[in-house]
Image (cartoon, rainbow, N blue to C red):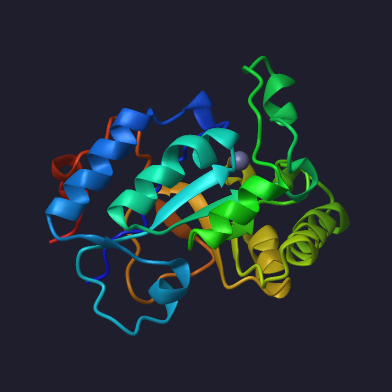
Amino acid sequence: MYHKVGSPPFGTRFRGLYLPTWLLARQLCEWKSAGWTSVSLEEFIEPAVPMRRRVGLTFDDGYASLHEEALPLLREIGFRAIVFLIADRIGGSNDWDTAIGEKPAALMDRTQIQEWIEAGQEIGGHTLSHPSLVRLTLPEARREIVDGKKKLEDLFGRSIDHFSYPYGDWNPQIRDLVAEAGYRTACTVERGINQVGDDPFLLRRIMACRPPRTLRTLFGLMPG
Ligand SMILES: [Zn+2]
C-alpha cells in the first residue's frame, strides 16, 4: 500500500494556517522513531523502493521561516521535503495574502532557496503570482503555469517537475494545462491518502496543523 503524501503547509494562505515549529518537530520525531522515512514525489510516482511507512512532505509558498526553522529540523531528522515556489515573488512577501488582511510574511530569497536545494531538499512550482487559476482565462492560466515553471528552471538551473495549485483550486482544464506544461505531478488541498493508480495531477494531502497531526491521527485516515 502506498502511504500518503502528507503536507505540513508551513505557511499557506489556505485558511490562514501556519504549522508551529514545535508541531513539525514532534511530527518528524514521531515518524522517525516509528520507522517512517520521507519519499520524494519522483519516488512516489516511479517507486524503486517499497512505499511502506513513507510520507511525502510538501510546503506551499516558501516562507523564509521554512529556511530558518524547518530546514534545520529536516536536516537533523534526515527527511526530504519539497517547497512549491511562486516564481515572481522570490525574496518578496505574501502580497496575495496581505491584500485580504493576512499578516505580511517574508518569502525565501534566491540564496535561501539555493541553500535549501544544497541541503538536499526539493523545489516545485506554484505559478508566477499565486492566482486562483480557475478564475483566469485559459491563456492567462497557461502563462502562470508555463512561465512560472520556466522562470524557476532558469533561476535554479534544474528541472521543475512538480506543481501545487494555489489555494488548491483546479478544474479539468487547469489540470490538463499543468500536465501539458511538462509537470509530472500536482498537489491539491483535498484531504486523503494517495494510492497506486491515482491521477498524479490530483494528489491529495493531509493538513499537518488542523487538527494537529500525530502519528495516531494520521493512521486513523489510512485505509485498511
Ligand atoms: Zn500557496
Name which quarter of the figure residue 141 lies in. Answer: bottom right
**Does 208 sit above or below residue 41?**
above
Residue at 84 percent of width and 58 percent of height: 143
Position of residue 35 measured from the top left corner of the image (x, y, whole percent): 14, 60
Query: How many numbered discs, if any?
Result: 0
Name which quarter of the figure residue 53 lies in. Answer: bottom left
**Does 173 sit above or below residue 89?**
below
Position of residue 25 measured from the top left corner of the image (x, y, whole percent): 29, 38
Q: Nearer the viewer, residue 170 or 1?
A: 1
* Residue 83 shows in this picture: yes
Ligand 1 sits in which quadrant?
Answer: top right
Q: Nearer the viewer, residue 224 or 21?
A: 21
Position of residue 221 measured from the top left corner of the image (x, y, whole percent): 22, 49
Quadrant of image for the C terminus: bottom left
Name which quarter of the figure residue 32 lies in. Answer: bottom left
Residue at 59 percent of width and 42 percent of height: 62
